[in-house]
Image (cartoon, rainbow, N blue to C red):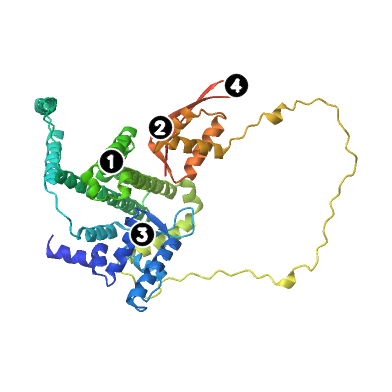
Amino acid sequence: MDYTTLELLSRQHPAWQLLRAQHAPFVAAFLNRVFLEPNVRTLPEAHLIEALDDELFGLRERLGEDSFPRDARAYLNDWSRSERGWLRKFYPADSDEPRYDLTPATEQAIRWLSSLSERSFVGTESRLLTLIDLLRQLSHGTERDPEVRIDELRRQRQEIDDQIARIEEGDLSLLDSTAVKERYQQFRELASQLLADFREVEHNFRRLDRQAREKITLWDGGKGELLEEIMGDRDAITGSHQGRSFRAFWELLMSQSRQEELGELLDKMLRLPAVAEERPEPRLRRIHYDWLEAGDHTQRTVAQLSQQLRRFLDDKAWLENRRIMEILNSLEANALAVRDAQPPGPFAEIAAISPSVELPMERRLFAPPSSPAIASEPVEVGDAEIDASALFAHSEVDPAELALRIRRVLQARDQVTLGEIIDQYPLEHGLAELVTYLRLAGESDDSVVDEAGSETIAWLSADSIQRRARIPRVIFRSV
């Protein structure tokens, strides 16, 4: 970092601008309270305005009415401006109400401010051991000589044999309270940093997607060449270091055995007396579910970006909206041209839509009701024999009963897959019941769909034929 780089960062980086802002304590404290402390990814505008009104009321009570002159909506609009870049304001696909999300730069600034508070002690031993372990992974993971790797594995085996022998002889060495606290603090910091990384991973995916869209907007060549370029960019997203690292993390976290191991280790760590003295946050017990939720949000964002990119290239929409696309391309190209140097004042106009006027007197004062013609013939009792069994052959799937089954299984476990629920409660109504389970999963905020995994669901149809369906792995979680 030289002077030029730091000087440029001080003028352009949102985190630096936040730290230099006049009301930086107010902004950082509020955003930390509503986003980072409860680990919330996005909030609707109405909820955020209500929380900010409460914050402003409390501050004005203590500091005076003139301390913060603007209202909550004005502050949110100011913080989400591109010049600020502290909040990301966006509209979800299924809602007209805007939502807000922290930007990675804002989260970095707030977490740096949190690190300024004094710590009881700074652990150095566990950090050194972590560094040595990382060096070993780098050295052994890139070693191509089989003999060297085998020698290393033999050395590790010998160390394990020596430890077993010492324990059998009664020499059981334990970590003292200082070492336990040091490792607990390091775990807490890394767990918190991992949550922060998800927001930056998602931001990087959005940046790659925006670059692809800019290329589409400014493209003046053939469509075949454009598709080749876009598919290349898509492969670049999934094949980038960011994409491959996130994919490996997600597959590791979605492992059932790994989650059970994490839960057991967290329980054991929180029961240690030295850790209990530190008064750990209750949320730390479920930190792996926070990772799961944050990773799922990133997965959904990547899938949504891919869907939007495919829709962007849809052939039918391209032809049907050709004229609209030309106008939008022109607007977007002009917007991109002035993005870094916006002209002062209004620079574009939109013609007003002419309303159609209907005067009250144009309506008819009275419309005579139409009389339906009803035949008054007497009903005759028939004597034909009709098979009425078809009226009773229909079955109905009760979603409430299926939801009750899910809750019953989750009473004994933190999470369960749809296949495990059906193993315990076999399908009685075949495919319709399976579809109802999937609908419940889609409507619930406590379920996750793992696109990387799959399950095979089997059931007997009404005609005693074995049916099977392969579906993505659906995971229900307890709240």
The amino acid type found where label 4 is placed reads Asp
Q: Which residue is mark 3?
A: 34
Q: Earlier in the sequence, mark 2 or mark 3?
A: 3
Report crowding for label 1: few under 14, some 14 to 19, many 20 or more residues within 10 A (C-alpha): some
Nearest-to-viewer mark from 4 and 1: 1
Q: Residue at x 23, y 61 (%)?
A: 113
Can you give x and y, in whole percent of width and height, for residue 168 in the image?
Answer: 13, 25
Nearest-to-viewer mark from 1 and 3: 1
Q: Which residue is mark 4?
A: 463
Q: CA distance from mark 2 to mark 3?
A: 36 Å
Can you give x and y, in whole percent of width and height, for residue 8 in the image?
Answer: 19, 65
Indicate which disc residue 474 carries. none
Kind of element beneath mark 2 = strand
Q: CA distance from mark 2 to mark 1?
A: 28 Å
- The C terminus: image quadrant: top left
Q: Earlier in the sequence, mark 3 or mark 4?
A: 3
- The N terminus: image quadrant: bottom left
Q: Is residue 55 left or right of residue 371?
A: left
Q: Earlier in the sequence, mark 1 or mark 3?
A: 3
Residue toward you, 295 or 264: 264
Q: CA distance from mark 4 to mark 1?
A: 49 Å
Up-down relation of residue 414 to residue 64 (above or below): above
